[in-house]
Image (cartoon, rainbow, N blue to C red):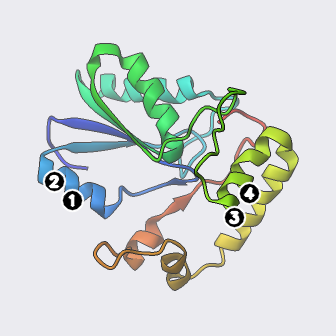
Amino acid sequence: YGQSQNVVFFHHGSPSAGPISPHIRRNADANGFRIIEVVRPGYGSSTAIANRSVNTASQINLDIADALGIENFAIFGQSGGGPHALASGHLAGNRCKAMLIVAGIAPFDDPNFDFAAGMPEGGREHWSLPLTNMEDFEAALLKDATEMSSYDFDKIKEIFDVDPENPISDEMILNMQVARPRNPTGQN
């Protein structure tokens, strides 16, 4: 989105991928940035890569920069895109001039650190489940996806507690793409 030479690579959250939200576009316009969304393999309409890792997805960021002749850039990661943004910044070295992580996901494998601290109870249970029972987690994701596929526009707006100052348009909802697991046994 945008034509500026000031490029920001955007790593979307989980489980969504799709059009860049209006508030991000408005901020890009106001501050003279071009936003390139990096849709991870297996999300939205992006082709899945079996057993991909965070580094695999992050290398794609650099491949895009190289293909477009972009030497320097910033990186923005939101929620589940945070780890991918951090890995992209690490792989990019000095090419990455700035990085922003919003609502980032914390490490889950450190026994001295509670990665779900501060999450609402429902989110805490949901995101802790894959650490104990992957089959139950996959079943919960399928149940959520099935339930969400029946939502109408008003239900989606209600769930996301839409801010009247930044409403979600029906057109934006129509263009949203929710991730469908294509390789549930692969890494994310």
Circle 2 residues within 10 Å: few <14, some 14–19, many ≥20: some
- In this view, which residue lies farthest toward the top? 94
Q: Position of residue 74 (x, y in %)?
A: 28, 32
The relative height of residue 137 versus residue 96 in the rendered view (above or below) is below
Q: Nearer the viewer, residue 163 or 150?
A: 163
Residue type marked 2: Asp
**Residue 147 as seen in the image, left or right of residue 34:** right
Please say if the residues under marks 4 and 2 sit with CB atoms less than 8 Å apart: no
Mark 3–mark 4 Cα distance, whole angstroms, equals 6 Å
Identify the residue under disc 3: 145
Please say if the residues under marks 2 and 1 sit with CB atoms less than 8 Å apart: yes
Q: Earlier in the sequence, mark 4 or mark 2?
A: 2
Please say if the residues under marks 3 and 4 sit with CB atoms less than 8 Å apart: yes
Q: Position of residue 29 (x, y in %)?
A: 16, 54
**Residue 10 as seen in the image, left or right of residue 118:** left
Identify the residue under disc 1: 26
SS under mark 3: helix
SS under mark 1: helix
- In this view, which residue lies farthest toward the front? 112
Mark 4–mark 2 Cα distance, whole angstroms, equals 35 Å
Mark 1–mark 4 Cα distance, whole angstroms, equals 32 Å
Q: Residue at horizontal 39%, vertical 58%?
A: 19
Identify the residue under disc 4: 141
Residue type marked 4: Leu
Q: Residue at horizontal 67%, vertical 33%?
A: 108
Q: Position of residue 80 (x, y in %)?
A: 54, 43
The relative height of residue 62 versus residue 78 in the rendered view (above or below) is above
The relative height of residue 74 versus residue 66 in the rendered view (above or below) is below
**Residue 128 as seen in the image, left or right of residue 154:** right
